[in-house]
Image (cartoon, coloured by chain):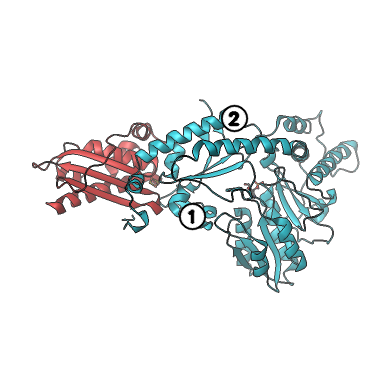
Chain colours: A cyan, B red
């Protein structure tokens, strides 16, 4: 079977072979397999050295102190630890949390859980191009607000949040600021020396590292306190117990170090590929790029092909591995909550495809994606009664639909 | 989602795609579903004076199973009387196309479209 062309780098990335090699060296008897917490022999010391080296590599990419990095199992855990950890530690100070409607489920479901525990959450609404502004945050702040949690780059639409400006607002009001940077680390510059962010979540597998490892940045000055969510041997200064996974951590460190070296070159190339893709499809009628036109990462192109249904589009694009704006898993087709929060109608949300481009994507890949997308859209529009009606000048909003 | 061979066949080579004149007294049009639900099916039949369906056409906005269901029923209906066509059940469709349980509603939609087209034709007589 010929494998489909991978254009889903926002979902996950393959491990860079340079990273995989270093990880393999930390597994077998001949390798660096020791427990980094073993203090009494060289196996432990070596493993600890590898872990601390990786900690420095992660800290370097974001201009932080290595002591501010806590290893976790991924961005989901980091988000949980940051938000629940702060809520549980500071609950006497206040019960109010601010986030947005377009956060990752790791943040939204964590907030839902805290609501069940008695916290109150404000969900900010983005503009139609996916922006959450510093002013919205300022306006939503209350006396009892303890934390604001916003993502740096949205995983579906690639829009970048102005975390530097929002950090000024939260710091001035003595409210903690957590940022989910799973989709931004290694793709846009992050400087935690200047940005007033207190907590930041990272994942390795979005930037050519392994799955199952991530980190949480926890600021030392001014100091941020957390209540641990995982109790045990007191690893990671008590914030996250559990034997450190040397091979995973080494992989994450190496991936972050490579990202630091290659980010600029990768971005230039990937941005050109994204432009090429958009140029290749945008002349078809009723095709839209979702999310802000310029305030975005280079690898993401979320495109709506109006009057074409998403699942059949994916079926036609079987030779492309992409994501859809809807998940037709049951009788009720669920359009993406992110696209919906932008105010997009359900039809357009259903017809959206997220192409995400990465380090190993080539021009030929993009040309293939363009050709297949065009063919699929033309074919499905031929089949679409909605396209017919649109072409006949019927206003679809004025039609009385017989919903089933 | 894995698709059955039958669904893929109808999806790759849909039969009887098209549109007939809605105002023609011999034509019955059924349009069911809603864009917001992710599926809209338009099924049309052309009925001769003997009450036999001479031609059938469809256009469908929906998933592959919805497209295949409507394509399949246009094939079946040609040559049937209105009564025969009215007896097509969604279970016949889902069986023929080997639809998984989550896709049964796509075949229900096709059954609804047949009924709507027949009703529309009758209302014109
Ligand atoms: C913005 C964002 N946050 C969190 C996650 C979850 O990361 P992980 O898979 O490392 O738990 C992802 C990826 O799915 C993401 O895109
Ligand atoms: S039309 Fe919705 S799943 Fe088939």
Chain identity of mark 2: A
Residue A363 marker: 2
Q: Quarter-wise, where is residue B87 in the image?
A: top left
- Between A338 and A77, the residue placed more toward the observer is A338
> x%, y% of residue A305?
46, 44
Residue sitting at 28 percent across and 39 percent down?
B18
Residue that numbered label 1 is attached to: A344
Residue sitting at 84 percent across and 38 percent down?
A50
Query: SS class of the residue under badge 2?
Result: helix
- Between B69 and B12, the residue placed more toward the observer is B12
Task: Give the total number of marks visible in the rendering.
Answer: 2
> x%, y% of residue A72?
73, 48
Distance, label 1 to label 2, CA atoms, is 31 Å
- Between B74 and A211, the residue placed more toward the observer is B74
Chain identity of mark 1: A
> x%, y% of residue A110?
63, 59
In this picture, residue A7 sits left or right of residue A163: left
Residue sitting at 38 percent across and 51 percent down?
B35
Crowd tier of the residue under label 2, counting other residues whose Cα lies within 10 Å: few below 14, some 14–19, many 20 or above: some
């Amino acid at each position: 079977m010929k494998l489909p062309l991978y254009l889903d780098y926002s979902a996950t990335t393959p491990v860079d072979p340079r990273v995989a090699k270093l990880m393999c060296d930390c597994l077998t008897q001949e390798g660096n397999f020791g427990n980094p917490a073993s203090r009494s022999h060289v196996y432990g010391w070596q493993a600890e050295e590898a872990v601390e080296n990786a900690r420095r590599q992660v800290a370097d990419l974001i201009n932080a102190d290595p002591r501010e990095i806590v290893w976790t199992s991924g961005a989901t855990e980091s988000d949980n630890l940051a938000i629940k950890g702060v809520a549980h530690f500071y609950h006497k100070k206040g019960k109010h949390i601010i986030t947005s409607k377009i956060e990752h489920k790791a943040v939204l479901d964590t907030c839902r859980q805290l609501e069940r525990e008695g916290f109150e959450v404000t969900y900010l609404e983005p503009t139609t191009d996916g922006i959450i502004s510093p002013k919205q945050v300022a306006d939503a702040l209350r006396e009892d607000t303890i934390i604001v949690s916003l993502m740096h780059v949205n995983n579906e639409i690639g829009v970048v949040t102005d975390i530097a400006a929002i950090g000024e607002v939260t710091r001035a009001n003595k409210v903690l600021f957590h940022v989910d940077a799973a989709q931004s680390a290694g793709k846009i510059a992050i400087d935690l020396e200047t940005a007033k962010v207190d907590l930041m979540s990272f994942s390795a597998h979005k930037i050519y590292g392994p799955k199952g490892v991530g980190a949480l940045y926890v600021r030392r000055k001014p100091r941020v306190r957390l209540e641990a969510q995982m109790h045990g041997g007191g690893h990671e200064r008590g914030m996250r117990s559990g034997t450190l996974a040397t091979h995973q951590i080494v992989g994450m460190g190496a991936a972050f170090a490579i990202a630091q070296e290659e980010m600029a070159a990768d971005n230039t190339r990937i941005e050109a590929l994204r432009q090429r893709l958009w140029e290749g499809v945008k002349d078809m009628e009723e095709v839209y790029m979702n999310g802000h036109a310029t305030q975005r990462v280079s690898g993401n192109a979320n495109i709506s092909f109006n009057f074409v249904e998403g699942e059949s589009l994916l079926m036609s694009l079987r030779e492309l591995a992409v994501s859809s704006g809807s998940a037709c898993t049951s009788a009720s087709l669920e359009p993406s909550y992110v696209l919906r929060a932008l105010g997009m109608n359900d039809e357009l949300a259903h017809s959206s495809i997220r192409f995400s481009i990465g380090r190993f994507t080539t021009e030929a890949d993009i040309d293939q994606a363009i050709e297949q997308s065009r063919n699929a859209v033309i074919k499905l529009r031929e089949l679409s009664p909605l396209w017919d009606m649109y072409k006949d000048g019927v206003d679809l909003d004025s039609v009385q639909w017989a919903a089933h | 989602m894995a698709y059955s061979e039958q669904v893929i066949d109808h999806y790759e080579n849909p039969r009887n795609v098209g549109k007939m004149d809605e105002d023609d007294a011999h034509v019955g049009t059924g349009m069911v579903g809603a864009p917001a639900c992710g599926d809209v099916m338009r099924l049309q039949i052309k009925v001769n004076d003997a009450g036999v369906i001479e031609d059938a056409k469809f256009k469908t906005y929906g998933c592959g199973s919805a497209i295949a269901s409507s394509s399949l029923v246009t094939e079946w209906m040609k040559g049937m009387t209105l009564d025969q066509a009215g007896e097509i059940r969604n279970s016949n469709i889902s069986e023929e196309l080997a639809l998984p349980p989550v896709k049964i509603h796509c075949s229900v939609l096709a059954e609804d479209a047949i009924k709507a087209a027949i009703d529309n034709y009758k209302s014109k007589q």
